[in-house]
Amino acid sequence: DGGITQSPKYLFRKEGQNVTLSCEQNLNHDAMYWYRQDPGQGLRLIYYSQIVNDFQKGDIAEGYSVSREKKESFPLTVTSAQKNPTAFYLCASSPIAGGFSGANVLTFGAGSRLTVL
Amino acid sequence: GENVEQHPSTLSVQEGDSAVIKCTYSDSASNYFPWYKQELGKRPQLIIDIRSNVGEKKDQRIAVTLNKTAKHFSLHITETQPEDSAVYFCAAPWANQGGKLIFGQGTELSVKP
């Protein structure tokens, strides 16, 4: 199913809880990304990683954390510090980080919908 | 930094008509412009892209045009069909941030049979 798998598809969180969204890819891609999708706001970058054991904050990193211990895996933790976590979360990967002169073709996962109760 | 503006936010056309979605970008060093289509409940998928060394690229019923001087690019869909109904996103790379893609706000296209 596209080589990039996100789980769970739906997740419910109580106030004050941390939750972790899984993202696994078997495309041998170096770079991985987490985007948040809200209606009318497009795709906003949370975190990205260009190589194992390294990652950078995106535009809306507050209240989120990530790890990149393996090339295939890039889990996202939504912490209790994220004040408005209800959203659709998309994981993506690309062969290389893109770079100034490169094409950065992204392959997306099917997404995880998080709802805060 | 890179700022990508996309218009319109919603677009409704009759089957068979053409649809045009426009995006502007701010980083003059951007050199790659993809378009993604996201059907309801599904993942975004790349449908066409263009590099800055060409002004137009076609793939069957879809085409993308690029005006580097004006810093805008457009998606053109001809002979629209109901299965073209989806949300479309444009994107442009932010050169000073390793080329990471910045997305537009999205256009919800509805094709009425």
Image (cartoon, coloured by chain):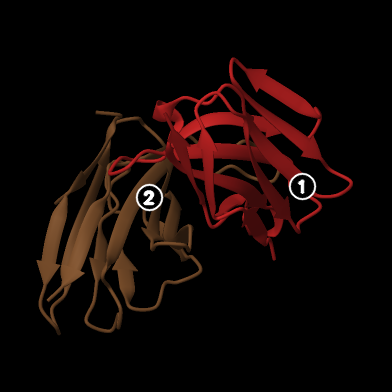
Percent x, y of residue B83: 40, 27
Q: Is residue A29 above or below residue B93?
A: above
Instruction: Give the label on residue A52, or none.
Output: 2
Percent x, y of residue B39: 36, 38
Residue B6 showing in the rendered view: yes
Percent x, y of residue A73: 27, 47
The residue positioned 64% from the left and 36% from the top of the image is: B75
Check disc 2 and give the amino acid type.
Val
Of the chain colours in the picture, the one used for chain A is brown
Q: Is residue B39 above or below residue A89?
A: above
| Disc 2/disc 1 C-alpha distance (Å) | 35 Å
Percent x, y of residue A46: 42, 64
Label 1 chain ID = B
Q: Is residue B88 above or below residue A39?
A: above
Q: How many marks?
A: 2
Residue picked out by circle 1: B72
Front-most of A112 and A28? A112
Front-most of B15 and B21? B15
The residue positioned 74% from the left and 33% from the top of the image is: B65
Quadrant location of the C terminus of chain B in the rendered image: top left
Instruction: Give the label on residue A86, or none.
Output: none
